[in-house]
Image (cartoon, rainbow, N blue to C red):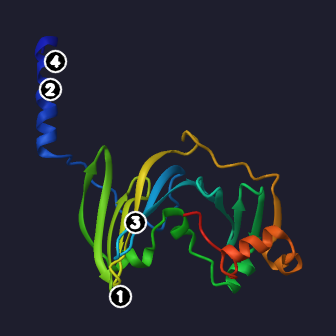
Amino acid sequence: MNSSIRNALVPLLMLVLVACGDRRPVPQLDLVQSPPPVAAEFRTTVEPAQGGNSSTEWRFWRSHDRIERENPAAQSGDLWVRDGKMLFHTRLYHADRRGIEYHNDDLQILNAAPEWIALSTLLDPGLIGVLRERENGWRDGYPYRRYTGAVEDVVWDITVRTDWMLPTRIERRGADRQVETVELLRSFEFGRSPWQPVDSADYDMLDYADLGDHERDPFVMRIQAEAGGGHMHGHAH
């Protein structure tokens, strides 16, 4: 086949592929294997039933035994580290260059030790297991699967990019008619994002178990007030 004929056939072949859709197999959603390292940016939007919504953009980095999230606007973040079966969490306050460390025992006492797979994929395996797969295919060059259903008066609509094991959209509609949506804005191979986590290596760290010894510390007093007197355990988004 000469080059002129071949060049004429290429656009035609592309049109046929677009018309027929991408027929490649769609990878399964595997919530057992360790997901690949990635960096991503998300937006969480909350729309109350009475109107007036609010949104927050946050960043996410995932490697094999380390997960970090940051809320740039609030100058805060969360670092999770896995060491064997032990889980450690650090709540970071970048403006103060300080942090609060939660050891595995603290998390167990606070009932705040999530499954690693839920932390690393932003998906609840138990929830996904009871939803119905509504569709699957390829979109913008990546494979996806979409899950929908209602659980305890909450309606879910979740689309997952199955090659990188990241949700591209999570919509939650509560019985109170409030809608919360998490959307994937951008994603990158780990280490290739235009932004990196804030270096917290030299931050002044406090153990959660020792907070009672620092009750007069203005920093501790402030974040306790912001948490409503709670245990100050939270997430960046």
Task: Pinpoint residue 50: horizontal percent, then vertical percent.
Answer: 35, 76
Residue 183, by quadrant, is bottom left
Task: Pinpoint residue 194: horizontal percent, then vertical percent.
Answer: 55, 39
Q: Earlier in the sequence, mark 1 or mark 4?
A: 4
Q: Residues within 10 Å of mark 1 (few under 14, many from 20)?
A: few
Label 4 sits on what residue type? Asn
Q: Secondary structure at mark 1?
A: loop
Task: Pinpoint residue 186: horizontal percent, then vertical percent.
Answer: 44, 47
Residue 208, by quadrant, is bottom right
Disc 3: which residue = 53
Q: Residues within 10 Å of mark 2 (few under 14, many from 20)?
A: few
Q: CA distance from mark 4 to mark 3?
A: 51 Å
In the rendered view, tell whether residue 229 sits above or below residue 81. below
* Front tag of 3 and 2: 3
Label 1 sits on what residue type? Glu
Quarter of the image that includes the N terminus: top left
Label for residue 44? none
The residue under the point 70% across, 76% down is: 225
* Front tag of 1 and 3: 3
In depth, the one of 94 and 189 nearer the eye is 94
Q: Kindly indicate whether the residue at mark 4 contacts the one at mark 2 (C-beta within 8 angstroms).
A: no
Task: Pinpoint residue 123: horizontal percent, then vertical percent.
Answer: 45, 68
Q: Earlier in the sequence, mark 3 or mark 2?
A: 2
Disc 4: which residue = 7
Label for residue 152? 1
Q: Earlier in the sequence, mark 1 or mark 2?
A: 2
Q: Secondary structure at mark 2?
A: helix
Q: Kindly indicate whether the residue at mark 2 contacts the one at mark 1 (C-beta within 8 angstroms).
A: no
* Front tag of 1 and 2: 1
Disc 2: which residue = 11
